[in-house]
Amino acid sequence: MKTYLDLVGEYARAHKKKNRITILCIAIAVCLVTAIFGMADMEVRTRTISAIKDYGKYHVLFKDIDNETADLIGSRADTAVSGWVHHIGYGKLNGKQLEVLCSEEAISREMGLAVINGRYPEKPDEALLDRQAVEQFGISLCDRITVTLPGGMEGKYTIVGVYGDFASLKVQDAHGMILPSEGLKAVTATADVSRYYVQFKNGVNMRQAIDEIKANYNLSDQQVHENTVLLALVGQSRDSYMMKLYMTAAVLFLLVLAAGALMIASSFNMSVLERVQFFGLLRCLGASKAQVGKYVMLEGIQFSLKGIPIGLVMGIIIVWVSTAFLKYVNPAFFRDMPLLGISWPSLLAGIAVGFFTVVLASLSPCRKAAKVSPLSAVTGNVDQNSMTQYKAAARTKHIRVDTAMGIQHAFASKKNILLMMGSFAISIVLFLSFSVMINFMHQAVKPLRPYVPDISIVSGDNSCSLDPKLPEQIKNNHDVKRVYGRMFAHDIPAASSGGEGKLNLISYEQNQFNWAGEELTRGSIDKVIKGKGDVLLVYAEDSPWQIGDSITLKLPSGDKTVKIAGMLATSPFDSAPGTQTVICSENLFRDLTGARGYTVIDIQLAEGAGDDTVDRMRSLATSQMRFSDRRQSNDEARTAFYSFAIFVYGFLFIIASITVFNIINSINMSVTGRMNQYGVMRAVGMAGKQLHRMVIAEAAAYSICGCIAGCVLGLPLHRVIFQGMITSRWGLPWEVPYAALAAIAAITVLTALLSVIGPVKKINKIDIVNVVNSL
């Protein structure tokens, strides 16, 4: 050895087993941070791909601007891609609705339009057609087709390319035709809605860029529309709800860092305290306090250099396994999910947590090791001054002596009980905080609700014109699982003592009422089902009405009054601002409006039903009806749900695993710190079973106090996060998460009780004299 610091490496080689627990603890803490942040990064990438498919890869669009302004915006240094998309309107192709667009190729590609066969049109009489139309009408490339353009004029176009299906077109039972920008001149007589789409470069402050464009060209808020979802995924949305989600993510981020840091600090502190006598012997050999401190610091750095790479590899593997599971178990849903992707932010976070936490955790042990007296080290009485002085004997009136002593040990040192409670509590707080994301997942992904149909037959003019006998006719198909209809009455003026407004009145039958029961936040559904004048109100922030209010509906047949009997958190229906959604029974709807037919008939298909079944359902729809195929949009929704589910439950599994390891490590640290006291007790006659009960009592005290502390700290935080993410969006009131509490409490208590087995066996196997002299 050239210097005393070389002793760090020599000691590590001689005591490999002792150092493994510290290195493993650092690795697991780094793995926790890397895996969680990596999975979050993969989820954001997947959601970004999904958002681009649904909304297009643009950040902002401008409407009602001239070409000169558009050219100036497109020439900005922070603009990556820009271009016009002209919505000509809806025409007809072979009797089917046809959406006609004119667009530039570059921006079309960014909007998610993929040419799967042929090429993009270049001449005014060339066009792209969607794949479904090509297959349905038997059209081939280079065929000349005649379409009825918006406004009634006819146009002839050569089909030079085919693009992939859009779920929105299938839902509307419509087709789409894309013309090049030059094709706009041929249809100038029709209504033309033009929008200029802009995609910014990576790293640009997009909110600032949008504000600059609005100020420079005097654009109003009505002329500027942001792609809220895509901006949110890159962290640049200014939407108030997204700001709440950003704040929630920051809180969870800090909790993850705190859990990792506490785990590393506890383990490293235990490693140093176990070898205080060794550091005292170094002092005997002439080492100064500063040299001992440098020794401990260098040892911590070497631990981190070994543990961090292991943790990073473990975290990456967890992320890869999760993404591979999604991609290959269900490739139809997750074909676009990144495979074997590297998340650099997660790696940097893992390295930062592992390295800086070890350095910070080294400071306190450095001071303790440097203060060791050489005389104490030589005599073997290093821990005499630190042994707890008990002011009173253990209370044994109602419990066993060994159990009472274990409880007394737990509460003897305020600092020790606080550290142990904190170690247990941080895991519980982390688990409770992340469990809110389960509620968020189930509320945010509407299409996976049980009422979502595969096929819908809709009245062409949104009136109650569908034959009420049609559902019975559809039920006769063995590939149909369930059929249910609804009647709609839109924009009904209404008033009550709470204020005036408009409402959309919608009828439910028994299946839909059963599903609505899961969304009921207050009130009762039973009265509404009876159809005697009671209705349900769907929660909305701008609603002037509450449960118990009587509402007067101003209908063509005269004023009629209904009473709000219950409140739903959400419904499958959207409404304009200021218009409320009200649900009633079919009988009450007919009594109020006089209508007899349905507006919408929804169909859920049995498993294994294919396109043949859909074609038979399509044949039932007349030209006065719209046939809506929702299967593709439902599949895309399942993609979002399953990927988010893996993301959320993966988080909770990792947190639960880390909780188990953290508890085991904490209990082991506590037992090791009292090894000499247990040796003394064995020397005076304590049996192995008594020692076991004493340690179990101590561990139980830690776990119970930790659970209480975790609940006291975690439940208010859970409530704040729940109200910010769920209540403010869907109106669901916060409730105590009994299931999450029971799960994490059971894990904590059971792990604490099982974690004492190893340390107690170790004590029983060691010679009494060695135990007394051990640290």
Image (cartoon, rainbow, N blue to C red):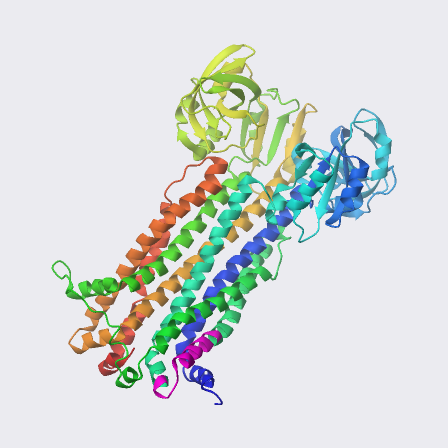
**Quadrant in the picture for the C terminus:** bottom left
Extreme residue in the bottom direction: 1
Most foreground residue, 210 or 482: 210
* Dominant secondary structure of the residues highlighted in magenta in the image: helix
Q: Position of residue 68 (x, y in %)?
A: 81, 38
Q: Position of residue 214 (x, y in %)?
A: 70, 38
Asked if residue 293 is positioned above or below residue 395 in the image, the reply reads below
Q: Is residue 144 visible?
A: no
Q: Quadrant of residue 87?
A: top right
Inspect this view and state whether residue 172 appears: yes
157 sits to left or right of 453: right
Q: In screen coordinates, is 725 left or right of 624?
A: left
Q: Position of residue 686 (x, y in %)?
A: 17, 73
- Which residue is pictured at 53% across the width and 47% down the height? 246
Residue at x 55%, y 26% (from the top left corner): 485
Pick the residue in front: 112 or 463: 112
Residue plotted at (71% across, 41% down): 213
Q: Is residue 708 magenta?
A: no
Q: Quadrant of residue 470?
A: top right
Tag count: 0
Residue situated in front as seen by the camera: 347 or 54: 347
Q: Quadrant of residue 621?
A: top right
Q: Which residues are magenta?
A: 283-301
Q: Residue at x 25, y 79 (%)?
A: 771
**Residue 294: x and y, percent?**
44, 78
